[in-house]
Image: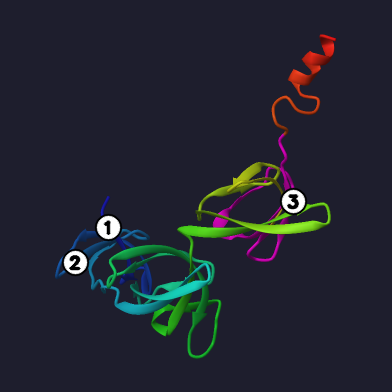
Amino acid sequence: MNEEVEVVCPSCSPRHPVLHEVLKSGVNPVVKCSECGTVHPTVIETPRNIDVKVIVSRGDSSFPLHTHLHADDIIRVGDEMFIDDESSDEVYPVVITAIESGQKRPEAAKVADIDYLWGRAIDEVCVKIAIHEGTTTRSVIKQVPGGYQFTIGSTEKAGPDEFKIIKIKERDGSFRSRDGIVIEAKNIKRIFANPVHRRAWGSGTSWSSRRREQSW
């Protein structure tokens, strides 16, 4: 399949760009309009790249990165993107949490108008878990990949602690409590859970103790 671009068509759309198929690339490109089929020469502008500063937070720490983005691209809060930092030769998957543009924090902005971005690393995240037992609550942390899935009603482990997930608070402030709902770790603010206590083999009313009672 040939490359496609959006340019004006002298026949059916002389003012607004429409989709075209590139028949010939290079210095003097030729394209075919996908709307009316007209074949004509055109000028294909190469997107201008801009160096954008991104302040990335991971846990309690933050660090600056730099990446190149197309000047005409639109960035929105909540977008997930890979930050390819040339100075460190590292690639970080992040979710955009804030945009700084002209001393304002808009929900979306063109790259050319952005001063810098704020992002949260989602390759590895630390999920906070509040375990309720009686009248006490204690907190534990489970470090997992950002795409790790937690299911309400399921059992998980964090170190020596085993717990059953009762409710999840998402990063947008909403709560989920229906069994079977699956939420990725990168979208979780906090997990609420109950402890799981497993009886040792042979204790209480286990199989071994029942066998002893029947032999009496």
Residue behind mark 3: 177
Q: Which of marks 1 and 2 is nearer the N terminus?
A: 1
Q: Which of 48 and 142 is in front in this view?
A: 142
Asked whether, in this view, residue 58 is left or right of residue 71, the answer is: right
Q: In this view, does 181 lie above or below 210?
A: below
Structural crowding at the residue carrying mark 2, measured as other residues with C-alpha within 10 Å and reported as few (<14), some (14–19) or many (≥20): some
- Give the residue type at disc 1: Glu
Asked whether, in this view, residue 7 is left or right of residue 138, the answer is: left
- The secondary structure type at the circle numbered 3 is loop
Question: Which stretch is magenta?
Answer: 169-198
Q: Which of marks 3 and 1 is nearer the N terminus?
A: 1
- Give the residue type at disc 2: Pro
Q: Does the magenta stretch include residue 177?
A: yes
Asked whether, in this view, residue 8 is left or right of residue 27, the answer is: right
Structural crowding at the residue carrying mark 1, measured as other residues with C-alpha within 10 Å and reported as few (<14), some (14–19) or many (≥20): few
Residue 167: % across, % down: 72, 53
Residue 105: % across, % down: 55, 83
Residue 3 numbered mark, or none: 1
Residue ID at (79%, 14%): 212
Q: Is residue 102 above or below residue 90?
A: below
Q: In which quarter of the image is the C terminus?
A: top right
**What is the image's colouring?**
rainbow
Choose top left, top right, bottom left or bottom right for residue 19.
bottom left
Q: Which residue reaches farthest top?
A: 215
Residue 29 numbered mark, or none: 2
Residue 8: % across, % down: 33, 72
Q: Nearer the viewer, residue 198 or 121?
A: 198
Gap between marks 2 and 3, in whole Å? Answer: 57 Å
Q: Is residue 200 magenta?
A: no
Residue ID at (53%, 49%): 148
Residue 136 numbered mark, or none: none
